[in-house]
Image (cartoon, grey):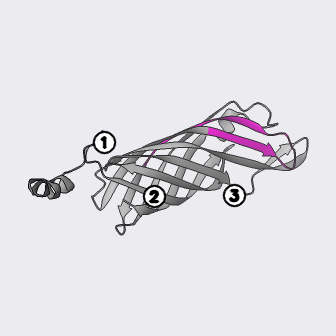
Amino acid sequence: MLIALFIPGALMAQQQSLAGNARFGFFVAPVLKVTGISNQVETMAGLSGAVIIGEWFSIGLGAYTLISDFKVDVDGTLENLNFTYGGLEQDIIFLSDSLVHGTFGLLIGAGSASLGDVVSVDRFFVGEIGGDAELNVTNWMRISVGGGWRFVQGVTDLEGLINKDLSGFFASVAIKMGMF
């Protein structure tokens, strides 16, 4: 009988963990970027997804690819640039429960590029740093607008292109959907 008195209290006790009482969430987001490639304005599309830890940090993956028709002159022939990159994304989130709030983020990953139908693919390091303003539209959707800088290092086998041609500023817009 005495044991029965302690069972409800034990069942209602709060679980302890290393994360404390941290709130967890997630999101997926289609992303559109306008960026400079070799001094021309180009368009990239991608997908980002992350786990939100607490109300201030997210960690996940992002992948982006060039969707505009960028041509490179290779020995008098114009070849299409195929440019894709992705990696680990981390964001610090400021005042996430406010109607409009900010994020500061970093991507660390790898990229690849090729010209035309050539089977030779150049692989390289890609890093991005940037910031966004986010609007809480609903409790499951946020619109994010921001910008930053993409850093590329290790381009060696692309005729007519070097690291600085794939590095540059970008502006982005994303629609984040998930549990915040």
Looking at the image, the residue that sits furthest to the front is: 1
Magenta segment range?
110-131
Please provide percent x and percent y for residue 62: 56, 49
Q: What amino acid is found at the position of numbered circle 3 in the picture?
A: Ile
Please provide percent x and percent y for residue 138: 35, 69
Q: What amino acid is found at the position of numbered circle 1 in the picture?
A: Ala
Q: Is residue 72 left or right of residue 67?
A: right
Q: Is residue 3 left or right of residue 54?
A: left
> What residue is disc 3 on?
67
Instruction: Quote the CA–CA distance across marks 2 and 3.
Output: 23 Å
Q: Earlier in the sequence, mark 1 or mark 3?
A: 1
The residue lying at 30 percent from left, 42 percent from top is: 19
Mark 2 Cα within 10 Å, few/some/many (few <14, many 20+)?
Answer: many
Q: What amino acid is found at the position of numbered circle 2 in the picture?
A: Phe
- Per the image, label 1 sits on a secondary structure element best described as loop
Mark 1 Cα within 10 Å, few/some/many (few <14, many 20+)?
Answer: few
> What residue is disc 1 on?
19
Q: Nearer the viewer, residue 119 or 99?
A: 119
Please provide percent x and percent y for residue 146: 46, 52
> What residue is disc 2 on?
27
> Which circle, 1 or 3, is nearer the viewer?
1
Q: Main secondary structure of the magenta part?
A: strand
Quadrant including the C terminus = bottom left
Q: Is residue 108 left or right of residue 100?
A: right
